[in-house]
Amino acid sequence: MMTENASVPESRRDLAIHNDWWASGWAHVLPRQCFALTMLIGTASQPGCTGSLDDLLQEVFAGQWDMIGGDLDSALTFSWPDAEWDYEEAPEGREAFEANRWKEFGAMLSAAGFPVPTTVRDLSELYLAWGLAGREETPDGTRWSMPAVLPLPGDLLPLDAELTRQLDRIRRGTDIGSLVNTLTTYLVDHLGEPQEVLTSLDRLAAATGHDADDVRLAVAELVESGDAQVRRGQEPADVERLEAHQRFRLVMDWDHFNAAPVQLIIRD
């Protein structure tokens, strides 16, 4: 599934990014142009779109896109060359940072038997080898595609223990965020943003299409973030200890919820 962004002015295409991209963790493994490349391939994978990535880049950006470094033959980097360097976060400086990242990245790919890419085009070929993308020649032209679920970096590359832990934390956080999004979308769109609702984990599960344990995680996250309270009668209740069938009052603090810096709601 792709999430569409705003239409590009004077273009026939909507930029799209695979919904699984953020949780997959690839952005923490690959050079910085991976996001723009994934968006380009996601856009190329939309129904009715045919042609090479060069064709699409020409159509959408007149052949030059700063976010991808220029064109598909631009050199890959792990940092933004024109951005001011943060010496507090990386005191070694840009050149040393880049050299270290390339050393780690090259060793990881070589250990797995993959060539080390130097350009965005090289990276697009690795996407095909890894199953992040598909490419097929049809009578109508080149068709690009992406799988419903992206393979994970750890399925294909030998990640070190710290990176593995980092990606696991990201996936857990993204999964819970998606569950919270589904639950709050139900509360807003179907129940009209109630101040409180008498419900159970089973009922919320049936309403949102998730199982009761997933809903428990979402409710617990709302409570932890200060967006909701769970009560039985007048007393606070621990959602972790509730049976799936037990009734409870979910009391929402919508002012607190809406005051959060970012609220991402994706409606199907």
Image (cartoon, helix red, strand yellow):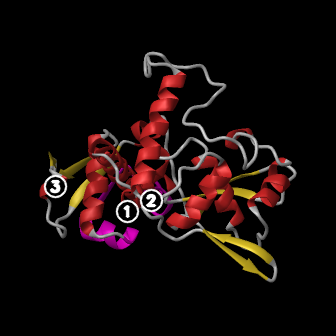
Q: Which residue does the image show at 26% across and 70% down from the upper left? A: 202
Q: Earlier in the sequence, mark 1 or mark 3?
A: 1
Q: Residue at x 62, y 41 (%)?
A: 76
- Magenta segment: does it hold 200? yes
Of the numbered discs 1 and 2, the one sitting upstream in the chain is: 2
Q: Is residue 82 left or right of residue 208?
A: right
Cβ–Cβ under 8 Å for marks 1 and 2:
no
**Which residue is under mark 3?**
240
> Measured from the top left, where is residue 133 in percent x and y?
58, 66
State the image coordinates of residue 55 (x, y, percent, origin top left). 82, 60
- C-alpha span from label 3 to label 2: 45 Å
Is residue 232 among what the camera can see?
no
Judge by depth and name the residue closer to the eye, 103 or 84: 103
* Image quarter hosting the C terminus: bottom right
Task: Kindly identify the amino acid type of the residue bearing the numbered disc 3.
Answer: Glu
What number is the disc on residue 145?
none
Amino acid type, callout 2: Gly
Tell me, yes or no, whether the two marked residues, 1 and 3, touch with CB atoms within 8 Å.
Answer: no
> Marks 1 and 2, Cα distance to the nearest angstrom?
14 Å
From the image, tell me which residue sits under label 1.
155
Residue 140 seen anywhere in this rendered image of the structure: yes
- Residue matched to label 2: 113
Q: What is the spatial separation of the Cα atoms under label 1 and label 3, in whole angstroms?
A: 32 Å
Residue 228 in picture, x, y percent from top left: 31, 45
Q: Per the image, is 210 magenta? A: no
